[in-house]
Amino acid sequence: MTRSFSVSSGVLALCFMGLAALTLSIALVFVLLGYWLVLPFAGLECAGLCLAYIWLAKQRGDYEYIKLLHDDIHVEQSFSGKVTKSSFNRYWVQLNVLDSGRGRLSVFLRSHGNQTEIGRLLTIEEKKQLIEQIKNGFLG
Amino acid sequence: MEAVHDHDHHQPAGLMRYVTTTNHKDIGSMYLWFSFVMFLMGGVMALVIRAELFQPGLQVVQPEFFNQMTTLHGLIMVFGAIMPAFVGFANWQIPMMIGAPDMAFPRMNNWSFWLLPPAGILLAGSLLAPGGAGGVGWTLYAPLTVQQGMGMDMMIFSIHILGMSSIMGSINIVTTILNLRAPGMTMMKMPLFVWTWLITAYLLIAAMPVLAGAVTMTLTDRHFGTHFFNAAGGGDPVMYQHIFWFFGHPEVYIIAIPAFGVISEVIPTFSRKPLFGYASMVYATASIAILSFLVWAHHMYTVGMPVEAQLYYMFATMLIAVPTGVKVFNWIATMWKGSMSFETPMLFAQGFLFLFTIGGFTGLVLALTPVDIQLHDGYYVVAHFHYVMVAGALFAAFAGVYYWLPKWIGRMYDERLGKIHFWLSIIFFNVTFFVQHFLGLAGMPRRIPDYALQFADWNMVSSIGAFGFGFSQIFFLYILLKAIKSGEKAPEKPWDGATTLEWTHLPTPAPYHSFETPPNLKD
């Protein structure tokens, strides 16, 4: 399971560099004329845009991998570059579904005091399919 | 309608729905209502101005208050009404038109909107400050700004907040369009409204820091002993004008370009033909955006500049007529041999086309340096930019509201009343502003509460038109409320010529959550 993106990291970086170059060069012209107070605002704006794009770039590598190996359900997740792995015995694991009623549906695997949310990259319909798949194919 | 997964979603209710919402449709609606409230507020200020100008002499308000009204009217209409209106359209339409579930940064989107009410309150509240609001004109020229009371600081702070909101909105729009398009929705397949907003967002990102810098320097000149714009301290007040207009001219296009986008959706729909010259429309819009950064000093021919600079700015400004002409040609060519019908959105689009072209032509007249030196700071200029801003941006916004209202609320507006609104608007608009060309040519200066007797007749006509135009917009509010409360149920696709995703892939009204699974448009 991965996220959907319609533009590559390279293109996004190019867009940012183009915008930052334009904004900062405008500000630099004003700085050279002595009107330096334009520069901090241009810098702030570029920083904001940069943060937004870094946030997106970090999400680009997000994935979730669920597999059944022998009697264990293995879950490997990577969100914003942080990889976590957990495994649950298929005979002991509980599947919990939390429907907030506000357009949000959360799916958890829970066992022996450990809990992992799965399907975070899926739409609600896909989450429902995932729940069915786990109920019918994974649980003991 | 496989793009919809709304059957078991519960829409949050109550006031907190709007405070905490990250839904692009809720936020779009809030932008649109906020802009309408500000539009009425700015409109009332315009009526104060026109009431005072109904006859020569001082009858209604004091000159200081008149100046505050002209200043606030301009700022509120530009930053509080027109810009947020088109951001409202962007919020509602962009995700639905590109097959995205929402904006790229929904929480930032919420924040972008909720910055606006405090900014609006600061702007309008500056009237209550000791000495009243700044009476300096929307351009906030130095050194007059240094001599104002505390209301000026409130206005500066308000502009900062509005600028922050615009920047965050732009970052969101750029990222959404670049990153969240459905598979198959390539850049050159995007609806033109989406293209125009992508270009506008870039313009905002490039222009806004300049305005923020300009008003901050004004603030430090006022309170922190700097002399950026104070000639006595080695500063340069004319430089303020350069800096302001470096922002101000692109600002004109920040307002106009999304309006072009709306018109480019409405005209093909009601002509039942694809937009003529799609690629040339995209390139023309981008050219206008680039040129808008290169012509700012045509607003300041009278400050004294070398003749070479005057020539450059004159020719560069006239150059903008080329891509603008391409757009007008393409809109007309789209209608050529089309199966046209004239529902209210199309009427407003025609009104836009006709009047915006007049505004464009008077712009060409003002681009000519020797002519502009005669007409500078006069009513010809006032007439010109109202043809661009009101007949251009506002009429396009009306076209957009009538066009997309069925999709937004699932009900139809009253077509007969919509047409009456159009005819009232276009007639009273021309009664108000066409005659101002005559006043300007006869030499009447702008931003004055009293005038010489020879200007009396046309001013009276203009004031009558202004009150008629103002009341026509109350009628618009009635049409909206009637549609929301008791409008006929809208059919799935009320406009048979509509081809964009929100009409072809989503039901009417659009569900609270749409395109959670992106549509595949590769075929």
Image (cartoon, helix red, strand yellow):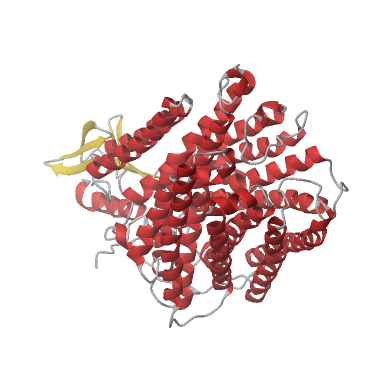
Tell me residue B230's x, y (percent): 60, 24
Tell me residue B215's x, y (percent): 57, 31
Tell me residue B67's x, y (percent): 74, 41
Tell me residue B98's x, y (percent): 37, 58
Say which of B477 and B46 sits in front: B46
Quadrant location of the N terminus of chain B in the rendered image: bottom left
How many marks do you count on the picture?
0
Say which of B92 and B265 sits in front: B265
Q: Residue at x 64, y 51 (%)?
A: B374
Name of the residue lying farthest toward the left: A70
Residue A105 relative to residue B405: left or right? left
Residue B456 relative to residue B38: left or right? right
Name of the residue lying farthest toward the front: B307
Reply above or below: A46 against B18: above
Say which of B368 and A131 sits in front: B368
Name of the residue lying farthest toward the top: B225
Asked whether residue B497 appears in the rendered view, the answer is no
Q: Residue at x 57, y 51 (%)?
A: B370
Say which of B22 and A72 sits in front: B22
Q: Residue at x 20, y 42 (%)?
A: A65
Quadrant location of the C terminus of chain B in the rendered image: bottom left
Asked whether residue B488 appears in the rendered view, the answer is yes
Residue B146 placement: quadrant:
top right
Residue B202 placement: quadrant:
top left
Reply above or below: B46 against B499: above
